[in-house]
Image (cartoon, rainbow, N blue to C red):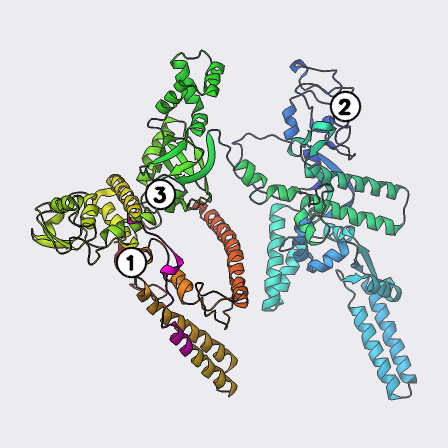
Amino acid sequence: MKTLNKTDFDYISLKLASPEQIKDWSYGEVTKPETINYRTGRSERGGLFDEKIFGPEKDYECYCGKYRRIRYKDIICEKCGVEVTRSIVRRERMGHIELSTPVAHIWFLRGVPSRMSILLNISVSDLEKVIYFAGYIITKVHEDEKEKIISNLEKEYKAKLKNATDDDTRKRLKDLFSNTKKEILEIYEGKVLNEISFHHYSLKYGICFEANIGAEAIYSIFKNLDLNKLKIHTEKMIEKASIIEKEKLQKRLSLIRAMTYAGIRPEWMFLTVIPVIPPVLRPMVALDGGRHATSDLNDLYRRVINRNNRLKKLKEINAPDVILRNEKRIIQEAVDALIDNSIAKQNDSAAMSQSQKRPLKSLSDNLKSKQGLFRQNLLGKRVDYSGRSVIVVGPELRLNQCGLPKHMALELFRPFVISKILQAELAFNIRGANKLIEERTPEVWAMLEEVIQGKYVLLNRAPTLHRLGIQAFNPILIEGNAIQVHPLVCQAFNADFDGDQMAVYVPLLEEAQWEAKELMAANKNLLKPQNGDPIVHPSKDIVLGSYWMTKSVDGELGEGKYFSSPNTAITAYEYGVVSLRAKIKVLATNNRKYLKFNEGFFDTSVGKLLFNSILPSDFSYVSDEMTQKRLSSLVDELIIHYGVDDTPPILDKIKSFGFKYSTFSGTTWGLDNVKVPSEKAKIVEEGRKLEEKTISEWKEGLLSEEERYQKIIEIWTYTKKELEKVLPKTLDKNGSTYDLFMSGARGTMTSLIQMAGMKGLIQNNQGKTLEFPIIPSYQEGLSPIEYFVTTHGARKGASDTALNTAKAGYLTRRLVDVAQDVVITEKDCGTKEGKVVSRENISGIEIPLSKNISGRV
């Protein structure tokens, strides 16, 4: 096997290996199923771990121990036959198994599309019948004998027809003649016969054809195929073929051309020699108590070797054909399981683990999927300086900070702390420094604090669906075991605090630290790369606190009072003269913030003044109630005014303000806060009447079944919408529920309507909307049948979520794969053609033109 230089190639191509090539890779034939001798713990001769084939287990030491040390390098021991070399060769040296019968490669038989099926123009099910000894394939037809049988049949038919006296006999003879002739004409190369048909044809027309069974039959057909002749023949057939046949033949032709171009013979789709992968890639590890943990591949190879050796013996003793066929079939199944056990499983021939009662992991299973060799081992990174923990909210943190448990930080920054200890001469070697760290002395914590000054760590939450799934933070040492995360970065990570975990990594190099601080830090990533919108939106408690403070309420203490300046009004509140949410009038100062009021009086409240006090002094006064939407647009304005660098401190002030006053507001929640509207009975009654009217029209034949169904759905949808209109009126304008709902902090109209309106129409597990609406709300309570009906949709929702997540992930993966070679190198593509941007999108919803055209003009 040639060893190439790492850079000594132009490209990589994967193609079928010939038996000669497999033997060329191999260092010897594996003839025994044994692995390791349980007494000596050494590999068995001729077995799956044989040192003679795969190389020595110990560096520069042969099996028998005659040659040891590097001075005997490359010598082959004359006693045990082992080459004296490094043991790492056991990672690359392959063996082979010489099969005593050809075996179909399951990828090319059952893969979609089946290459064998396309090449022979035989269906996959027929091919499987032949290969698994359930059917015979006609391999040769003697045309002259066939013609002889047909001419003899015609002579016999004419002679008997002359002697026939009545019409019935003539009709019977005619039918018999046409059926027999049809049977003879249906004898052609590649026709697959079942057991009964084969015996029937053999007895009657055995002289004019040859048939065979098993993989050997297809192998011999493939061996005799001339690809060039087949190519010319297929090209001629395409010229005459119909549109449907043309498509099929086109696939066949492209396969033939590809095989010719790559220099691949069709019979290589059958295995006569099986490569045995190096033993280090299918390890066997000794456990306590004399037992061994082994890779599944060893069991699969063992099955193939056992069955192959048994077939060899049966051939030697000239065993009956029935026994040989059965043995060949089970060898085919053993090789199928070795190559791809997941495909074999579909045919109920999967190899199962005896102890664990699970399918064994085959060669294909070890390569494919997320846990396969490529994605898990070759592309997966193993990071030394990393940790993982549950996340909790850190309301005191700044936007570029995260709270890191001190014990975790000590492990992550251990090398840096050791360096500091050695510099301070608290210890004189690494072992001593490690001992100090284990003892957790006060000096260690002081040095850790010193080490992390100005350092950044990366936080990552899986799944990392966009680049903001990994961001850099300056760690703050905290007690406990959970990582603290700033509440405003949750949206970028799609994180919440119900048990989510995050991984933490330490960038080690100076350049990596610079990149983390300047490019990946959370305070530098306020915008979505997707569209340039802000991704740091205040939500939940922050929205509630800000809304509660900026909402004016009638009848509060100090309502209608006039104040000479904003500061006077705030002082009056501190002395208990006016309440936070009272409607007051304040005289604007000549500060830039109040320019729009022209130094006149303006309507406001102390809450609004306090909220504006946290915004920059040159930012125009905001007099709106701070709902979630308004807060998001405010963040947008702040980023436009002050840029990405100066906005984070303002956001931190908004966060602290929101948390402080949401606590101060004393907002509570109880189910009785939401009242069932008094108009509900009337609205539902009207819906019932319309439903009855629709059913009577249907019974009279005025409506079809589909029209009746659609109309009933429309009636109850309209009824629910009518309830939605009256429900907000039942809420107390100054109550907690109204504040929570109207601010956008928590709850939507959907949740309110289900709590106090009606559950409404639901879908079954097929996704069809049921005509049976759930009239009661959760507050009124559901009957057992109503509750049972609602569970259908809930169950479907849960399963759909899981399935759609996997589908979306796989689609994204393929899209990224397709776009690998598309690299943006220019800022401007240089096109002179424009693009029409409509105010309405496809669904007819109006969107602001500014969003669509910003940055594109």
Query: Looking at numbered disc 3 in the image, what kind of residue is underneath it?
Result: Pro
Q: Pointer 3: residues within 10 angstroms few (<14), some, or many (20+)? A: many
647 to 678, vertically: above or below:
above
Per the model, the C-alpha gap separating discs 1 and 2 is: 79 Å
Look at the image and say whether residue 392 sits in the magenta stretch. Answer: no
Residue 216 placed where, x, y %?
78, 50
> In the rendered image, which residue does mark 3 sit on?
487
- Of label 1 and label 2, which has the lower sequence position? 2
Q: Which residue is mark 1?
A: 834
Magenta-colored span: 665-686
- Horizontally, is 353 left or right of 735 in the view? right
Viewer-nearest residue: 467 or 714: 714
- 412 sits to left or right of 179: left
Q: Secondary structure at mark 2?
A: loop
Q: Amino acid at mark 2?
A: Thr
Q: Secondary structure at mark 1?
A: loop
Q: Tag 1: residue type?
A: Gly
- Horizontal side of residue 109 vs 753, given as left or right: right
